[in-house]
Image (cartoon, rainbow, N blue to C red):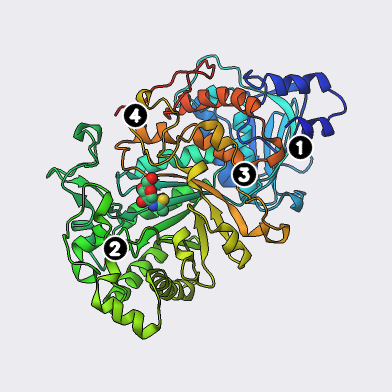
Amino acid sequence: MKSTIKKLLVGPVVILLAAATFAADTNLPAIIPLPQQMELRAGVFRLAPDTEIFASYASRQTARQLAARLRTGTGYPLKVVAKWGANRAVTNAILFTTRDASTNLGAEGYELTVADNSVVVRAPTPAGLFYGAQTLLQLLPPKIFSTNQVANGDWQMPCVHIEDWPRFKWRGLMLDVSRHFFTKSEVETILDAMALHKLNVFHWHLTDDQGWRIEIKKYLRLTQISAWRAGVGFGLDSNSTTAYAPDGRYGGYYTTADIREVVKYAAARHITIVPEIEMPGHSMAALAAYPQLSATSGPFTVPLHGGDYHGTYNPANDETFKFLNTVLAEVFQLFPGRYVHIGGDEVPNDAWKNNPECRALMQREGLKNKEELQSWFTKRIEKFVSENGKTLIGWSEIRQGGLPQNAVLMDWKGGAMEAASAGHDVVMSPTAFCYLDFYQSSNFLAEPRAAIWSRPLTLPKVYSFDPMPTNLPPQLQSHILGAQCNLWTELVPNLKHAEYMIFPRECALAEVVWSDQNSRDWNDFQSRLKVDEQRLDELGVNYRHDPARPTSANSSTSGN
Ligand code: TNX
């Protein structure tokens, strides 16, 4: 932050240093993720009841969203105006425009100028305008995020000039809705918080051993049977969750109408949804409904726990491909984004080895081991995905035995270097920096029960992450699309608990994927986070507050 700012600043040096030091003062910008370039200027812009918001065609949606948000907290009527007279001066107004926007800002960049009588957001694309609006909101006092009208608010923002764009184009968060089912509106709450920090990919882990969560019209047993299990399981208190059917079964699913609504909700926030349909492993829920597709023989119930229950499809059965292609075809219809995640992780060792049909297939195709058989399977699925104009993405394991030509790798346990070197795109999500199901501190007793198969993932650890693998030659670096954090929910039975695990680590990840690597400054981030916690308070989002970190905000631990 400091280096960029010093370069830009000629005049008000004193104010600038104050900004760097006292970012926690709500009158000074405490923006997360930190913008690429920010110059603080003298003076403030004050919102008034008659402030107008002008939007050209491309910016209408963003302007309306901003107006709605501003009206809630301020109670001001704030008109959105579609035409601005050619000779009319821009005063007491917020202007959104694509006109004269520098294309150097890229597909998601923006320029934001706050003067004492006007605010101008300029960007070449609607996404850029949207991100400009997010920064604008963060220039205002955190109370602007209040869900009620605030009495006697003083809605001023400091005069600034910001030019900003993301470092990476994939800035993601994964939510596992299989181990715990989150309702449509709970998912939308998460999407709102992602938008606040300019994240743009929501990876929706829709199927796993413990539950299938997406309605497929051609296979209704997936929602009649696979969406439900006998209880919450995982040793959790059955009172800690609300996801029960009237008959006492645990689970739930999204109808196709629900999915369409969430996709639209995300798109309005410039978030693309990447659906994940797990195959060939982690598929016990589906196999509970369609056991004829399994490589192993039972038991065929939706399991209450993890461990040895990984259901695995039989790649030697043509019905498997008929089923999966039909499911995927419906998924393609529901999700307009380019990427479709097919899982591919943790295929159990003996599922295929002990199956005579699989052994015969391996012999026929000259496949030496389980990895090559999985690669054969993934390639067949990838062909179908490509033919439908989509791009397949899968976890680290899809690389073993050979990555299909057009596939993208999601690195959770290695493979990024090799995949990028072979010309594949890669999304970074290594456990050491990105696993939100891990403890947030080594004081396990003070924390809700969390995954224990790795070291804790502390906030400074997330903040220290550089998604670009060291030693990746410069000419291959564009293959690293970005990074994401993942919340697996075996031990997360409700939304408040999920929020506690996600925030504030998501804030650190947002800065990792958006801001310049050289701008990383832990102390400065902490002081901005203090303000950001107040925003989360206003939005009603739960988060973990580190007792060692000073704050003025309240935070609670999970209700678990
Ligand atoms: C591994 S990460 C898994 C998940 C579990 C997680 C628990 C990955 C691709 N697979 O199925 O939920 O560990 O930490």
Q: Earlier in the sequence, mark 4 or mark 1?
A: 1
Q: Disc count in the image?
A: 4
Q: Single out the residue that lies furthest toward the left.
A: 247
User: Which residue type does callout 1 highlight?
Assistant: Arg
Residue 5 is marked as none
Q: Earlier in the sequence, mark 3 or mark 2?
A: 2
List x then y, in percent, for residue 29: 66, 26
Residue beneath label 4, please? 448
Residue beneath label 2, please? 216
User: Which residue type does callout 2 highlight?
Assistant: Ile
Q: Secondary structure at mark 2?
A: loop
Decide: is 29 above or below 379. Answer: above
Q: Earlier in the sequence, mark 1 or mark 2?
A: 1
Q: CA distance from mark 3 to mark 4?
A: 28 Å
List x then y, in percent, for residue 73: 51, 25
> Which residue is pictured at 56% across the width and 17% down the height?
153
Residue beneath label 1, please? 88
Q: Nearer the viewer, residue 2 or 125?
A: 2
Task: Give neighbour class at mark 3: few <14, some 14-19, many 20+ (Cα, 10 Å).
Answer: some
List x then y, in percent, for residue 273: 46, 53
| Label 2 lies in ligand 1 vicinity (Cβ under 8 Å) | no
Q: Earlier in the sequence, mark 3 or mark 4?
A: 4
Residue 82 in view (yes/no): no
Q: CA distance from mark 3 to mark 2?
A: 39 Å
Q: Quadrant of residue 136?
A: top right
Residue 466 is marked as 3
